Image (tube, rainbow, N blue to C red):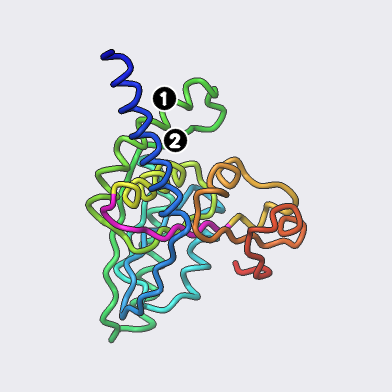
Amino acid sequence: MVCVVLAAAAGAVAVFLILRLWVVLHSRDVTPRESLSILVVAGSGGHTTEILRLLGSLSNAYSPRHYVIADTDEMSANKINSFELDRADRDPGSMYTKYYIHRIPRSREVQQSWPSTVLTTLHSMWLSLPLIHQVKPDLVLCNGPGTCVPICVSALLLGILGIKKVIIVYVESICRVETLSLSGKILFHLSDYFIVQWPALKEKYPKSVYLGRIV
């Protein structure tokens, strides 16, 4: 009898979580705002360069800006600091100049085995949850580094738990012409807006958004 009750309770919880996930993924918050808190996931090498080019085309209303990088990625930290300094020099009178850099462990190192990747990703997600809860961004913007997976899942959990609906925007790298990256394949069904930069990907994934080359 106890097992039946526990099974029924577990089933009810599972159904509730599935319904909450469906609501979060299909809701759209269009409330006008003066500013939008944005969390940007930067990755080593080309990922950071692309995401900063995209940020350069956004207005200062996307503020404050929170950057998340891997804890060993000093190159991205330097690029972000240079980008923000240049932005402040171009618009010294702006009210929206605050930015913050946060660090979490990498989900996967280069040539890391897949079994150990599961463990490092879970560790990264464990540290991402309190970060996302603390920042509570309005929007998460990412373009493919492995670090973005735990961040986006944590942002999704914020909505499932009824704390805050976070808009997730994924921009596939310009390097991806015909196939999605691993991060893209994972987040295609979890993001609110999935943007591709090549028509071949739009044909393969009709639900994606094709805007041409944007970085």
Name the residue tied to disc 2.
Answer: 107
Residue 142, percent from left and from top = 48, 55
Q: Residue furthest front?
A: 1
SS of the residue under disc 1 = helix
The quadrant holding residue 92 is bottom left
At a point 37% along the width and 41% down the height, the residue shown is: 17
Which label sits on residue 119? 1
In which quadrant is the C terminus drawn? bottom right
Amino acid type, mark 1: Leu
| Residue drawn 69% across the image and 54% down it | 205
| Vertical comparison of 154 with 118: above or below | below
- Front in this rendered view, residue 33 or 76: 33
Mark 2 neighbour density, 10 Å: few (under 14) some (14–19) many (20 or more): many
Label 2 residue SS = loop
Does 106 appear above or below 74?
Answer: above
Return the x and y of residue 75 as percentages of the image width and height.
Answer: 43, 50
Q: Distance between the Cα atoms at labels 2 and 1?
A: 9 Å
Whether 164 is among the magenta residues is yes
Image quadrant where one finds the N terminus: top left
Q: Nearer the viewer, residue 2 or 187?
A: 2
Left or right for 49, reference 38: right
Numbered range of the magenta stretch: 162-171
Tally of marks: 2
Q: Amino acid at mark 2?
A: Ser
Q: Residue furthest bottom?
A: 93
Q: Quadrant of residue 185?
A: top right
- Which label is found at residue 93? none
